[in-house]
Image: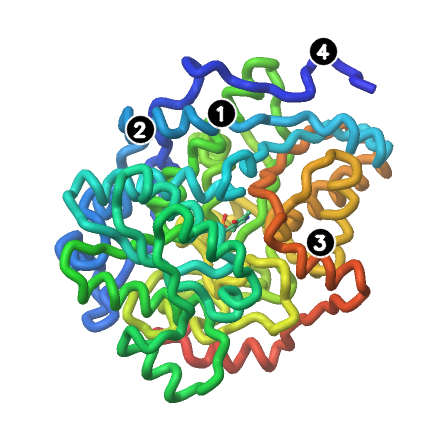
Amino acid sequence: MRKENIPYKIYLNESEMPKAWYNMRADMKQKPAPLLNPATRQPMKAEELAGVFCRDLIAQELDNDTAYFEIPEEIRNFYKMYRPSPLVRAYCLEEKLDTPAKIYYKFEGNNTSGSHKLNSAIAQAYYAKKQGLKGVTTETGAGQWGTALSMACSYFDLDCKVYMVKCSYEQKPFRREVMRTYGASVTPSPSVETEIGRKILAQHPGTTGSLGCAISEAVEKAVTSDGYRYVLGSVLNQVLLHQSVIGLETKAALDKFHIEPDIIIGCAGGGSNLGGLIAPFMGEKLRGEKDYRIIAVEPASCPSFTRGVYAYDFCDTGMVCPLAKMYTLGCDFIPSANHAGGLRYHGMSSTLSELYHQGLMEAVSVKQTEVFEAAEYFARVEGILPAPESSHAIRAAIDEALKCKETGEEKTIVFGLTGTGYFDMVAYEKYHNGDMTDHIPTDEELATYRAKLPMGH
Ligand SMILES: *Cc1c(COP(=O)(O)O)cnc(C)c1O
């Protein structure tokens, strides 16, 4: 079946692994818009963020000029336990699709947390420890970030408090237990532990929670607890920076075999895996050295890029976080209850938003039934049981490969396979039973959320 002299899996030696993260913002002429203080509407200064975030992470967050940040040795050593992740040539998928396209995927599911999130979790835990903190707080939706952070905190002996969206807490008891195995405390959100949680419960009794609400709780807990800071697993510049390890490894592996991708595809929730995967390629594009098609894939039920607006918005429901300029659906937007495929955040990384705004990348939205169809197809051919989030990228990669079949073009497609789906079997079950439906918000629905944007659009 193997058609070329390229192995099924391209690995890097330890000595070839990245020693520095790459910051795309350094090569952007038009920088992403700054975070604003919600009260003064002025750019947030490091001092103002210091009560919420870790010191060194704030420096990374605000740095638009430094292209490379050395990866501290402690983090590189942790990376070595589960990295480099394989870059797989999907020969089996190509054959099954009967496409002339050459398909590669970078698989980030080879660690216990089951996703790429560990790449940033270990970095954030390291800087928290370095600062001498007792612990960190965070939110988790589907549970991957909470799991990754629990693993990272136990490695550095830090306390970890996770606010888990209540419906997910109830539906995914095993996720919760994995986190507790690593020593984290897990609280269903909204909870009575925080003022914002109590307020939301009073306003919406019986609510099953949302990511935006869990963020507000975690931030409140951090700022009111001595020796704690808040950490976030996506959206922020620092997270994209840490995730650049994905793209740097991908590029190093492709370079070994002189492979040049035509199309790079990633799913987009808050934008961290995509921002990481594309980082070195976008760098070349920004410097005018190369050109690539870069495609973000999002759910049709939560279409921030394709149907959102580029405007300042709150990152959380409780409106305690800074304002970020991003493609957003509005901070009160919650995807319909039958949406099972993850990627449910209302906004998007401000860096990716600016790149998209400048036309340097594309975005498509896909329906969840088509996503699960692609997930199952992929599992049966390539063996890996993909996370629903990752399967958005699979869907788009298959669609591009099928276009190549029509035109006869031998394009090289690289996509990010961000994780595994073992904890998502309720969603798979729905799909198998034919109970999965597609909800696509109407223009009217989206307009009501958009009308509430804090600074217009
Ligand atoms: C969290 C997650 C995503 C989406 O987050 P991004 O920040 O957009 O990358 C995608 N895939 C998996 C497996 C995840 O856990």
Colour mapping used in the image? rainbow
Identify the image quadrant of the C terminus. bottom left
User: Element type at marker 1?
Assistant: loop
Label whose residue precedes the other's in the sequence (2 or 3): 2
Rounded to the nearest angstrom, the CA distance separating label 2 from label 4 is 33 Å
Say few, some or many: other residues with alpha carbon within 10 Å of mark 4 (under 14 / 14 to 19 / 20 or more): few
What's under tag 1, amino acid-wise?
Answer: Pro
The answer to whether the residue labelled 2 contacts the one labelled 4, judged by CB atoms less than 8 Å apart, is no
Query: What residue is shown with label 1?
Result: 84
Rounded to the nearest angstrom, the CA distance separating label 3 from label 4 is 32 Å
Label whose residue precedes the other's in the sequence (1 or 4): 4
Residue 197 picture quarter: bottom left
What's under tag 2, amino acid-wise?
Answer: Ile
Q: Is mark 3 within 8 Å of ligand 1?
A: no
Residue 318 lies, in percent from the top left, at: 34, 74
Position of residue 336 relative to residue 255, above or below, is below
Residue 120 lies, in percent from the top left, at: 38, 41
User: Which label is found at residue 371?
Assistant: 3
Say few, some or many: other residues with alpha carbon within 10 Å of mark 1 (under 14 / 14 to 19 / 20 or more): many
Residue shown at the point (17%, 48%) measured from the top left: 133
Say few, some or many: other residues with alpha carbon within 10 Å of mark 2 (under 14 / 14 to 19 / 20 or more): some
Residue shown at the point (50%, 69%) measured from the top left: 329
Query: What residue is shown with label 2?
Result: 71
Label whose residue precedes the other's in the sequence (1 or 3): 1
Residue 106 lies, in percent from the top left, at: 58, 32
Residue shown at the point (57%, 58%) measured from the top left: 342
Residue 96 picture quarter: top right
Label whose residue precedes the other's in the sequence (2 or 1): 2
Label whose residue precedes the other's in the sequence (2 or 4): 4
User: Which label is found at residue 5?
Assistant: 4
Whether residue 28 is visible to the viewer of this picture, yes or no, is no
